[in-house]
Image: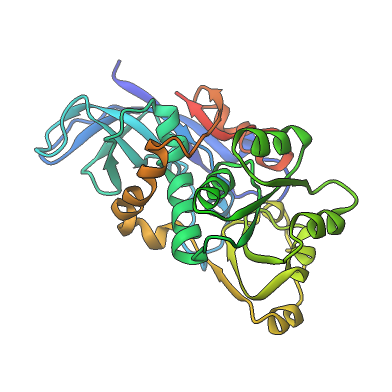
Amino acid sequence: MNTFTAINLIKRPTGGAITNSLFDIVEKEIPTLKDGEFLVKQSHMSLDPAMFGWMSPDTESYIPPVALGDVMRSSGIGEIVESKHPDYKVGERVMGMMGWQEYVLSTGQGLNKVTVSLPDEAVLSIFALPGLTATQGLFNVGKPKSGETIIVTGAAGSVGSIVGQLAKADGLNVIGVVGSQEKADWIVNELGFDAAINYKSDNLDEQLAEYAPNGIDLYFENTGGPIQNLIIDRMNPHGRVVVCGLISEYDKQVPSPGPSWLNVIKRRLTIQGFTMPDHFHEVPALLEKLTPYVMAGKIKHRSHVLNGLESAIDGLNLFYTGENKGKLIVKL
């Protein structure tokens, strides 16, 4: 076999569902290696909410958009099948930005060797972008303290579920916001969250009062939506808000209004947005921080696996519907 399949982005989304019309499925020749290069056969590919931003035409975002005609950007994991690089050997596993394609030619830049003896799905669910994002956002941005109360939106998602478990392991009271009773049961009964709130229920403020009677110290935001205002209303003085994602806003032409600045002033809140490309050079340190929690059995996960490269296209819409259960992964 001398060719492989890749998917290029050819149009920008304009709101609404992601469709095949935005992409071009192409066949490429497997490249001949030069000295200092190696070839990776990608086994699993990650689907992440950040992709909606990467497809947009916004050139002022934290990372340039995917150029039209280029392979769609994504992180993944795979095995080295051919190498002319002295530091990367055939049979070793690597993870990092690989794109929507079956094979990846690399010099090693942007890829990290996989050293843990876990299956590919587990590595991609925990040690790739979700775990790195959760670790950076919680510890280095949120700066949690034992005994505090944290609320995490998108708590059953790939990032939020890890944030909540890390926080619980460090002695915080953890409240998760989810979109279904099944997800609420999972984060409480399986992951150990102290409480779960279904944002679709009618008595959100009453639930916040019940589960956070002493207020909220740390707010890890993944979704956006009306519950934002209610959470900010219950933040303690000098509370911290970590803005990681706003999945409810990515398909809108005009973003919804956010919480009132008046509450920010009255409560002297610190609000910080962050994105992982600013911290890719810190990946080894983040993995060093995260690994002991995983090896001690304090981090559980579940994966929602789609089969085949082309399933990635429609798979992105699961973020809008909330039908994905766990880390969304494409198995190639």
In the picture, measured across the screen, residue 116 lies left or right of residue 307, that is left
Does residue 287 lie above or below 114 as drawn?
Answer: below
Name the quadrant of the N terminus: top left
Relative depth, front residue between 15 and 323: 323
Q: At x 39% / y 28%, what residue is drawn?
A: 120
Identify the residue shown where x is 54% and y is 45%. Answer: 165
Q: Quadrant of residue 213?
A: bottom right
| Residue 317 visible to an observer of this rendering | no
Please state the horizontal and vertical placement of residue 233, each as a whole percent of the image: 78, 70
Q: Nearer the viewer, residue 52 or 147?
A: 147
Quadrant housing residue 218: bottom right
| Vertical relation: 179 (above or below) 229 | above
Q: Residue furthest top?
A: 1
Image coordinates of residue 206 in percent, x first then y, are 86, 57
Residue 209 lies in what quarter of the image? Answer: bottom right
> For this rendering, which residue is in front, 54 or 183?
183
Which residue is depicted at the point 46% across and 60% down?
Answer: 139
Q: Is residue 132 left or right of residue 287?
A: right
Quick check: 71 left or right of 280?
right
